Image (cartoon, rainbow, N blue to C red):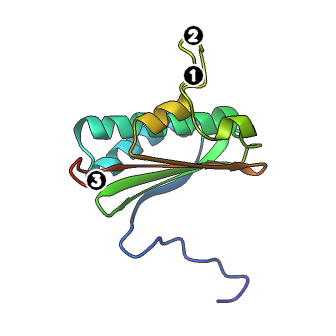
């Protein structure tokens, strides 16, 4: 492959990309509906679908509020689950806040987004630094799977 050619954006074999797009605050509501449709197409149903959509909505909102106002979201289905990755190009999280995500105090008006995203999904990974933050969450389509 030549240096000036872009690598294909196709994921690992067996991965089915359901959604991949850039967003800003004006797109969050429509994007939340798209995420719900994609996650349902990927096999999530009922409360697991609802929880996944709430978690992703929190990540989208965080990217806009704290990550520079724009972001990129990708949703894909793989091996009995649905995965979502939200990235922004903000300044990153302070070191003391990145890991682990802890439940905010009950009287704290903000700071619940990352905690909720982790609580409502099966996996939660975060990478943050001076050039942005990426959060990946996933939910299994069936509770009987490991």
Residues tagged 3 and 1 counted as in contact (Cβ below 8 A): no
- Where residue 48 sits, quadrant-wise, is top left
Q: Nearer the viewer, mark 3 or mark 1?
A: 1
Find the residue positioned furthest to the left. Answer: 144
Find the residue positioned furthest to the bottom. Answer: 1
- Taking the image as shown, residue 115 lies to the left or right of residue 42, namely right
Distance of label 2 from label 1 (alpha carbons): 8 Å
Distance of label 3 from label 1 (alpha carbons): 33 Å
In the image, is residue 130 above or below residue 12?
above
Q: Which residue is mark 2?
A: 107
Residues tagged 3 and 2 counted as in contact (Cβ below 8 A): no
Q: Which residue is mark 3?
A: 41
Q: Which sits earlier in the primary sequence, circle 3 or circle 1?
A: 3
Quadrant that contains the C terminus: bottom left
Q: Which residue is mark 1?
A: 104
User: Is residue 144 visible to us here?
Assistant: yes
Q: Position of residue 119 (x, y in %)?
A: 43, 34
- Taking the image as shown, residue 67 lies to the left or right of residue 62, namely right
Q: Which sits earlier in the primary sequence, circle 3 or circle 2?
A: 3
Please report the residue visible at 27 percent of the width from the left and 51 percent of the height from the top.
141
- Taking the image as shown, residue 8 lies to the left or right of residue 32, namely right
SS at mark 3?
helix
Q: Position of residue 118 (x, y in %)?
A: 47, 38
SS at mark 2?
loop
Residues tagged 2 and 1 counted as in contact (Cβ below 8 A): no
């Amino acid at each position: 492959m030549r240096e000036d050619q872009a690598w294909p954006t196709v994921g690992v074999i067996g991965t089915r990309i359901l959604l991949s797009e850039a967003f800003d605050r004006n797109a969050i509501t429509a994007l939340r509906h798209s995420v719900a449709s994609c996650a349902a197409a990927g096999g999530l149903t009922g409360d697991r679908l609802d929880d996944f959509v709430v978690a992703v909505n929190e990540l989208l909102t965080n990217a806009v509020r704290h990550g520079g106002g724009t972001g990129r979201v990708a949703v894909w289905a793989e091996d009995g689950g649905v995965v979502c990755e939200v990235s922004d190009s903000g300044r990153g999280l302070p070191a003391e806040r990145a890991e682990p995500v802890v439940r905010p105090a009950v009287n704290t008006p903000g700071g619940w987004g990352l905690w909720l995203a982790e609580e409502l999904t099966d996996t939660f990974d975060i990478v943050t630094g001076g050039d942005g933050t990426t959060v990946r969450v996933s939910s299994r389509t069936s509770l009987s799977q490991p």
